[in-house]
């Protein structure tokens, strides 16, 4: 939200309605860091106040999320791996280490694409990275669709109902806190088993 104030985003959503919701989340999911989720939340909030229709906001949010991630996937698939290798060589990272990172992401690609919807950085980059590591497209399409649908239902519904009783600023703060909790849970899920294995390997 560095480049847009909350008032500017609300004005965009009020003027362009469903197109703003669709374009905002689609562009963000393509890999461009704009506040797409914030625009979606504002769309749900405006639906709660009667300015927009709940079902149309939900449909455009889900469709935009799916579309944006697909664009991001194919951008990554077409030229992302070669670019990543060039970038890694620039920073003098061994190719075999990059390959190991690729394998590691592939092993967790489904989780990243699905749960990434609820985490800002993963939401932006999950699609392009899935394409870069050549995640099988049918598998990507399935988890992308499921993640986008569940994310859309949760975010738009919370914005619709909670927005009836709290201000937009409070609503955004609550959802931001929810995203932080999800991030911490995901990091714990990933790193706690690694730390436990590491401690078990240490000699007593």
Image (cartoon, helix red, strand yellow):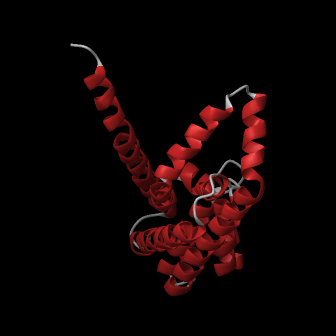
- From the top left corner, tell me how far across and down residue 7 is, in percent: 65, 61
Question: In which quarter of the view is residue 20 placed?
Answer: bottom right
**Residue at position x 44%, y 56% from top?**
111
- From the top left corner, tell me how far across and down residue 98 is, in percent: 63, 37
- From the top left corner, tell me how far across and down residue 80 is, in percent: 73, 51
**Residue 204 to residue 127: above or below:** above
> Is 28 on the left-hand or right-hand side of 106?
right
Residue sitting nearer the eye, 199 or 148: 199
Query: In the picture, which quadrant includes the C terminus?
Result: top left
> Is 109 on the left-hand or right-hand side of 83?
left
**Residue 202 to residue 153: above or below:** above
**Residue at position x 52%, y 79% from top?**
58
**Residue at position x 74%, y 27% from top?**
91
> Is 188 on the left-hand or right-hand side of 134?
left
Residue sitting nearer the eye, 111 or 10: 111
- From the top left corner, tell me how far across and down residue 174 is, in percent: 42, 56
**Residue 19 to residue 135: above or below:** below
**Residue at position x 58%, y 45% from top?**
102
């Amino acid at each position: 939200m560095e480049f847009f104030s909350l008032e500017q985003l609300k004005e965009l959503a009020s003027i362009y309605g469903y197109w703003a919701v669709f374009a905002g989340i689609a562009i963000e999911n393509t890999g461009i860091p704009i506040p797409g989720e914030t625009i979606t939340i504002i769309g749900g909030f405006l639906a709660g106040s009667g300015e927009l229709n709940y079902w149309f906001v939900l449909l455009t949010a889900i469709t935009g999320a799916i579309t944006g991630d697909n664009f991001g996937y194919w951008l990554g698939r077409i030229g992302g791996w070669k670019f990543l290798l060039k970038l890694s060589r620039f920073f003098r990272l061994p190719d075999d280490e990059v390959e190991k990172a690729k394998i590691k992401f592939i092993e967790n690609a489904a989780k990243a694409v699905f749960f990434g919807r609820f985490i800002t950085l993963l939401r932006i980059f999950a699609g392009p990275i899935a394409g870069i590591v050549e995640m099988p497209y049918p598998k990507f399409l399935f988890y992308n669709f499921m993640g986008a649908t569940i994310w859309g239902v949760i975010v738009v519904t919370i914005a619709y109902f909670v927005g009836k009783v709290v201000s937009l600023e409070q609503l955004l703060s609550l959802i931001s806190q929810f995203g932080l909790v999800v991030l911490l849970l995901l990091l714990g899920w990933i790193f706690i088993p690694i730390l436990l294995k590491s401690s078990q390997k240490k000699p007593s």
